Every structure is written in structure tokens, then in C-alpha cells.
């Protein structure tokens, strides 16, 4: 069965999602053991992408619940379609049916608006359920979720208890803005995704933006890898390096130069202070570091370049 | 189940117990899950086994690092030989096995108290005199402190929520569910309209306090204050951190236990805190790790004497960012309680432009006075 894990890694690569072994292992186990997977890591490292790629791979529906503070059951589970209910009451006003019968009618499936969690429970085949940024909800919702994740049952007072016939593959993501409860952690398998290594990032950029060409892709990877080691207010993730290299392609750049980097810096650095210090202190040395003749080879090069860079700053 | 599989299970059980003894959340249930994971991964590949078990057993980056270390030690020897795992021997070979926790926490914290006093004597006699107030705060007075903090909390909450209340009137929504249910009684005519108010955003609080050498004598008081902050209900989400050269999140530690155990455990959670202070670095780390928890309704309270042995530029940057991202920044400086105090420490001068309220906090009275400032 372990071929599953290798298969997942290979098929994800076909979806242009570069999964390393820990990621593939975690996804394989989440499927095999039917446990939810909690994915943590800094912003922009591709946590959400995992769920999308998995849904494509399994050729199933992706159901997404974006969490925010104050998320309530009406937005997460279900809501009645009030307009339709009102209309229905009007239309049946003259009918001879009893009040009870009419009440039963308007509280039936036809008048139910399925929100993500109910959708996942009612799915005809196992879907991928993405519960995004779970750390943004409050403890009360987390406790509710804990119950749902253990028995896949939902209770709607008017309809009774619904049980999932095909529980979804569940992926929860967290940016760690607050610590999740131990109970939730225990319920889940765990995957930590960090900023990618030089090689992994290079592979990701190659796969996702092939138009950039090898030389530029290597240079951008080297540049971003070094940039991440500087004391920034907001460290750019892979999402930023992808945006950046796409922007460079649009700008028709085939290598990094002062002009084009200055013009596009807003794509990787999204903080005014970072941009200021980038322009005044780091831009020149960074460019120098990634444009040397033997430049941007790989991890070994990166360590050496970093040491040189650190001595100049 | 073949003999090999059985040996594997026994080893897994032992390994699970080892992990638990090292503070990981592992029970019989996780071990069962681990056994199922081993059925899925390629047993001939050590890396696959390692990653598979880690996915099941380690639930944070810290636990993953711990797991990596223990996995290496455990499986390199014992599994291959197939002999029974000498658990005790293994325990002995692993450095820093923590002592069984529980009773010892309190003994430890009380035992330390006197040593700390001695340490600080040598540091600065003037401060010790100024700090006598704190030594007097007994655990019994935590209740008073809690009441006081609750009052402070309510005050902060009402003062800062005025804006929310205005926007609530506009944002008021019809509660369709109730309106409709009640309309059935009138033949579907919605005679009574029910309204729903948006859930009120409570003011949040972030409390960061200095536990470095120069603040040692205040540490008991500040820990009690932190405990009171975490326990109060007037404000929304409250996060509490101690810092010296590093940052320690204490929210859960202080929330889940009784006051004495909580304070003891919090002390245990902050090793090596008697060195210098890197306020700037600690605040920067706070912003980086937990910064997303700040929002325009968060009040940030920092308790420190402002003696920063780190880079002042880092401190300034962190303070500017803090100021911008919270509703209000309050700085409590215990030294400000001594007569004739001027904020002359370079660190203190750096932070003052970014501080909304600067107040002494060396005893209960000064906290009561703070209530008036708000």
C-alpha cells in the first residue's frame, strides 16, 4: 500500500504541485487512516494549494470553509432559504392543508441552503474538505469542529441528525496566529510546511511558470532565498516568488537588474518599511550576489553567498 | 500477526511511552494509529517509517524536532536487534529527561524564590528597596489583583468599544429564522420583526512582560498580574508572554492551572531568563510569530524597565509596528514608581514616542492609579 504515498507524490507533481516526502506521506496517511490533516506553516508556502491539488488528484469536489472571527453555524453549516420559505407560505395560503403540514414542508431539504460543512456531510462521494485558517475562529467553533471531525454527524433541529455516508478527506490549515487546542491537535495528523529549500523552490517555479526560462528561474530562486534570510517585517512566501516571476515574465525580463527589480519589488515585499530598507540597503548587494559568474548553483552556493552577504550588511 | 510484526508493535508501544515521557501528546490511541500507519508506509525504508510515525505522533514544529532526536536514538539500536527494548536504560541514556511533574513544580518555585532574592541583591540595591512592595504580594492577594484587573479590563473594553456600538446600529440585521417561525402563527404574516445583532467584537489584550535579570524582583508580581489577565473575562482573547532574550508564550500555562501551579509551571517554561534583555528582538519575534493576532481592537501592554541590551534600531522598528497594529500601547515600568525617576534608559527613550500610556506598576496601588489613566 505504500506505493500510494509514492503515487501521490508523482500525481501531485503532474498537477504542478511539488510535494516533498513529508507532505506526500502526510496526505497518504490522512487518506489511509481516514484522519483529518492539520497543516501549519508560515503564510504563502502553499498550505491551501495542497487541498486543491488533492481534490484534482482524487477527481472529487473541493469544499472550502474559510474561517474568520465570528464564523457562525449559519455560515458554516446551513441556513434556511427564507425568501423561498416566505414565498411558499404565501402561495399555499389558500390551500386547505394544516399549519403543521405546511410547516413541515418549508423545513424540508428543498428549503435548505447547504453551507460547506453540511455539504461535506451530504456529499454523494468522498470530497476534499478544506477548513482554511482555523486559527482565526474562536474556541467555541473549534470545539464544535472537534465533534464533527470525530463522528461526522450534524444535527439540524428541524430535520434530525445527519450522518456522512462518505466522510471527506479533511485538511485544516493554520498560520499559527494562536495556538490550537491540544484536543484538536490530537484529533489530527500533522504536517509542518516551512519555506522551501533552494531545490524545492526552483522546482516549484519551474513547474508553475515554465515561461520564465531556466536562467531567470534560478536567479529569482537565489534572490528570494537570500531575501528570506534578511530581517523583514513580512517574509515573502512561495506565493510571492511565483507572483514575482510571473511579473518578470510580463515585464519581459530575462535576468534581474536594478531597474526591473525596483519596478517589481512591490510584488515580493508588501511592507513599506521592508521596501525602504530593501532599496536603500540590500538591493545592490543582493543583485551582486545573484549575478556572479558562478552564481545561483544550489544549496551549497546559497550558504556561501549568504555568508558573503551577511558580512556586507 | 507474525513474530516480526509483534516485535514491531511492542517496540512501538515502548517508543510511544518514551515520547510521552518527553512531553509529546501520545496515548494508547496514538500508538494504535501509529501501528496502522506502519501498515501503510514502506517498512524497508527508514525515512518512510520516520516520516509516517512523525505525522501521527508529533503535533507542532517543536514536537517534530523532539521526535526527530528521539526517533534516531530509539530505532537505530533497539529495533534492528529485535531484542526486548530496555526502556529504563534508554531513559537513562537520554539527557534532560524531565522529572515527573506535579508536586515538584510548587516546591521548585518556592525553593527558587529565596535564591532569586539573593541574586538580585547583588544587582542593584536601590531596586531591591523599590521592590519591597512586591515581595509583600502574597498568593492570597491574587484575588484582589484579579478583581482589579477585571475592573481595568471592563474599563478598557467599554472605552474602546464605543465605535463598535455605533456601527452595530447600522449593521443590525433581521433575524429571519425567528421572524419566520413566529410569522407562521399569523398565517405567514411577519407581524413581529426580530433583529439580530452582530456578535460584538471584544477588545483583545496582549500582555508582554520582562522576566530578565534586572526585573527579577518584580517577576512574582508580574506573573500574578499575567495570571489575572489570562483569567479575566471582561476582555476578548488575551495572550500573555514573558520575555528576556527570548519570547515565551504563557497563555495556556497560566489559563489551565490554579494560581500556584500555573506560576510554577510558567517559571519552568522560561529557562535561562536571568541574562540580559533583548526587548526589541523579543517584540519582533512576537510580531513575527503572533502578530496576526493583533488587530485594531487589541490593547498591547508591555511591562519592562526598558533596559535593552540589544539593537535599539530593532526595538524602534518593533515598537512602531506594534503601535500601528494595536489600538493602544500601554507601557508599565516598575521603576517609574520610584521618586525622581526619569525615563533615561536609552531603550526607554526609544519606545516612549510609540506609547499611549506610560505608568508605573510596582504594586497594587500603582495599578489602581492606572485605572484612572484609562
Image (spheres, coloured by chain):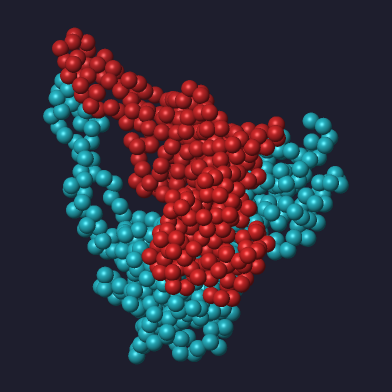
The residue nearer to you, when weighing A3 against A291, is: A291
User: Is residue B29 something one can see in this rendering?
Assistant: no
User: Is residue B166 something one can see in this rendering?
Assistant: yes
Question: Which quadrant, please, contains the N terminus of chain B?
Answer: top right
* Image-based side of B284 in relation to B42, left or right: left
> Residue visible at 68% across and 62% down?
A300
The quadrant where residue B367 appears = bottom left
Q: How many marks?
A: 0
* Image-based side of B148 in relation to A133, left or right: left
* Image-based side of B12 in relation to B166, left or right: right
Residue B160: horizontal and vertical position, in percent?
26, 61
In the image, residue A157 sits, relative to residue A94, either above or below, namely: below
Residue that extends furthest to the top in the rendered view of this protein: A96
> Residue visible at 27% across and 64% down?
B155
Residue B267: horizontal and vertical position, in percent?
55, 68
Residue B352: horizontal and vertical position, in percent?
35, 78
In the image, residue A10 sits, relative to residue B283, either above or below, namely: above
> Residue visible at 52% across and 63% down?
A227
The residue nearer to you, when weighing B102 against B227, is: B227
Q: Tell me, what hue is chain B?
A: cyan
> Residue visible at 28% across and 17% down?
A105
Kindly indicate which chain is depicted in red in the rendered structure: A
Residue B291: horizontal and vertical position, in percent?
43, 60
* Image-based side of B304 in relation to B340, left or right: right
Amino acid at each position: 500500500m505504500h506505493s500510494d504515498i509514492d503515487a501521490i507524490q508523482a500525481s501531485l507533481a503532474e498537477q504542478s504541485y511539488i510535494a516533498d516526502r513529508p507532505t506526500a506521506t502526510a496526505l497518504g496517511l490522512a487518506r489511509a487512516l481516514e484522519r483529518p490533516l492539520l497543516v501549519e506553516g508560515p503564510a504563502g508556502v502553499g498550505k491551501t494549494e495542497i487541498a486543491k491539488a488533492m481534490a484534482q488528484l482524487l477527481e472529487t469536489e473541493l469544499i472550502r470553509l474559510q474561517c474568520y472571527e465570528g464564523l457562525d453555524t449559519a455560515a458554516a453549516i446551513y441556513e434556511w432559504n427564507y425568501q423561498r420559505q416566505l414565498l411558499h407560505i404565501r402561495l399555499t395560503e389558500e390551500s386547505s392543508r394544516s399549519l403543521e403540514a405546511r410547516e413541515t414542508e418549508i423545513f424540508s431539504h428543498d428549503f435548505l441552503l447547504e453551507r460547506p460543512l453540511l455539504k461535506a456531510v451530504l456529499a454523494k462521494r468522498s470530497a476534499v474538505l478544506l477548513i482554511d485558517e482555523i486559527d482565526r475562529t474562536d474556541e467555541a467553533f473549534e470545539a464544535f469542529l472537534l465533534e464533527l471531525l470525530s463522528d461526522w454527524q450534524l444535527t439540524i433541529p428541524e430535520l434530525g441528525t445527519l450522518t456522512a455516508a462518505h466522510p471527506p478527506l479533511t485538511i485544516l490549515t493554520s498560520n499559527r496566529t494562536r495556538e490550537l487546542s491540544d484536543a484538536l491537535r490530537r484529533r489530527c495528523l500533522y504536517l509542518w510546511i516551512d519555506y522551501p529549500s533552494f531545490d524545492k523552490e526552483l522546482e516549484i517555479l519551474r513547474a508553475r511558470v515554465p515561461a520564465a526560462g531556466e536562467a531567470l528561474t534560478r536567479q529569482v530562486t537565489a534572490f528570494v532565498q537570500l531575501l528570506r534570510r534578511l530581517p523583514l517585517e513580512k517574509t515573502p512566501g512561495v506565493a510571492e516568488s511565483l507572483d514575482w516571476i510571473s511579473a518578470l515574465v510580463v515585464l519581459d525580463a530575462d535576468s534581474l537588474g536594478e531597474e526591473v527589480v525596483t519596478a517589481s519589488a512591490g510584488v515580493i515585499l508588501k511592507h513599506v518599511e521592508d521596501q525602504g530598507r530593501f532599496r536603500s540597503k540590500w538591493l545592490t548587494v543582493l543583485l551582486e550576489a545573484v549575478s556572479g559568474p558562478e552564481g545561483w548553483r544550489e544549496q551549497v552556493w546559497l550558504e556561501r553567498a549568504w555568508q558573503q552577504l551577511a558580512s556586507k550588511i | 500477526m507474525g513474530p516480526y510484526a509483534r516485535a514491531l508493535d511492542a517496540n512501538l508501544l515502548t517508543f510511544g511511552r518514551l515520547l510521552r515521557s518527553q512531553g509529546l501528546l501520545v496515548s494508547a490511541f496514538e500508538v494504535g494509529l501509529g501501528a496502522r500507519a506502519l501498515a501503510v508506509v514502506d517498512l524497508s525504508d527508514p525515512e518512510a517509517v520516520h516520516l509516517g510515525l512523525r505525522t501521527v505522533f508529533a503535533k507542532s514544529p517543536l514536537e517534530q524536532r523532539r521526535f526527530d532526536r528521539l526517533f534516531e536514538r530509539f530505532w537505530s539500536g533497539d529495533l534492528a536487534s529485535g531484542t526486548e527494548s530496555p526502556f529504563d536504560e534508554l531513559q537513562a541514556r537520554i539527557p534532560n529527561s524531565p522529572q515527573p511533574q506535579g508536586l515538584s513544580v510548587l516546591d521548585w518555585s518556592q525553593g527558587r524564590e529565596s535564591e532569586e532574592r539573593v541574586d538580585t541583591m547583588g544587582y542593584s540595591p536601590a531596586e531591591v528597596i523599590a521592590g519591597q512592595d512586591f515581595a509583600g504580594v502574597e498568593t492570597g492577594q491574587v484575588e484582589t489583583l484579579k478583581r482589579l484587573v477585571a475592573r481595568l479590563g471592563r474599563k478598557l473594553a467599554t472605552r474602546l468599544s464605543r465605535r463598535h456600538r455605533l456601527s452595530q446600529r447600522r449593521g443590525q440585521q433581521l433575524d429571519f429564522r425567528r421572524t419566520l417561525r413566529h410569522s407562521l402563527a399569523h398565517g405567514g404574516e411577519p407581524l413581529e420583526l426580530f433583529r439580530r445583532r452582530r456578535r460584538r467584537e471584544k477588545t483583545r489584550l496582549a500582555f508582554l512582560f520582562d522576566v530578565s535579570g534586572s526585573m527579577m524582583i518584580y517577576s512574582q508580581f508580574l506573573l500574578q498580574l499575567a495570571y489575572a489577565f489570562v483569567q479575566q473575562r471582561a476582555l476578548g482573547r488575551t495572550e500573555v508572554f514573558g520575555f528576556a532574550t527570548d519570547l515565551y508564550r504563557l497563555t495556556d500555562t497560566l489559563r489551565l492551572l490554579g494560581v500556584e501551579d500555573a506560576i510554577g509551571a510558567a517559571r519552568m517554561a522560561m529557562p535561562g531568563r536571568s541574562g540580559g534583555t533583548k526587548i526589541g528582538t523579543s517584540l519582533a519575534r512576537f510580531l513575527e510569530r503572533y502578530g496576526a493576532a493583533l488587530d485594531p481592537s487589541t490593547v498591547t501592554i508591555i511591562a519592562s524597565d526598558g533596559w535593552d541590551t540589544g539593537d535599539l534600531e530593532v526595538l524602534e522598528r518593533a515598537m512602531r509596528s506594534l503601535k500601528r497594529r494595536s489600538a493602544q500601547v500601554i507601557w508599565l515600568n516598575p521603576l517609574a514608581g520610584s521618586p525622581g525617576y526619569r525615563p533615561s534608559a536609552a531603550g526607554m527613550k526609544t519606545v516612549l514616542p510609540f506609547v499611549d500610556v506610560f505608568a508605573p506598576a510596582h504594586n497594587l496601588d500603582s495599578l489602581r492609579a492606572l485605572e484612572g489613566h484609562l
